[in-house]
Image (spheres, rainbow, N blue to C red):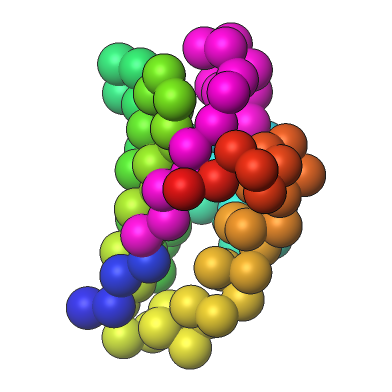
Amino acid sequence: MNKIHICRKHNLDHDQCRSVAEDLLGKLVGEYGGSVRPDGNNFSYRHTSGMKAIVEPKEGELDIKVKLNFMTMAFAPEIKRQINQVLNKYISEDQES
């Protein structure tokens, strides 16, 4: 199983960080379908193909872990590009790790 792991440092407050996480997940759902559910302070994304993601908005960083299966591995570069595109929209380069 292929994995994507992106962790970005930021200077956002908690609500702003959650908003970025929600925007990111909304883009995944809009592009690929699937569903999102809150899981404590985190969010879980699940697609019927078996692709899963955990998005953890934390103080000082936003951690995204995506697990791809054989059917979705071909989409890895595009998914990573889309995640980074959303993050770049909200988190400037001087805030990145």
- For residue 29, side relative to residue 56 (left or right): right
Number of marks present in the image shown = 0
> What residue is at 60 percent from the left and 56 percent from the top?
83
- For residue 65, side relative to residue 8 (left or right): left
> Compared with residue 15, is residue 21 higher up or lower down, i.e. above or below?
below
Residue 30 position in % (x across, y down)? 70, 52
Q: Quadrant of residue 32?
A: bottom right
> What residue is at 29 percent from the left and 78 percent from the top?
2
Residue 73 position in % (x across, y down)? 40, 83
Identify which residue, 39 or 10, lies in the foreground: 10
> What residue is at 67 percent from the left and 49 percent from the top?
93
Identify which residue, 38 or 2, lies in the foreground: 2
Q: Is residue 12 magenta?
A: yes
Residue 62 position in % (x across, y down)? 45, 36
Residue range of the region highlighted in magenta in the rendering = 5-20
Q: Is residue 70 magenta?
A: no
Q: Quadrant of residue 50?
A: bottom left
Residue 63 in view in this figure? yes
- For residue 57, side relative to residue 28 (left or right): left
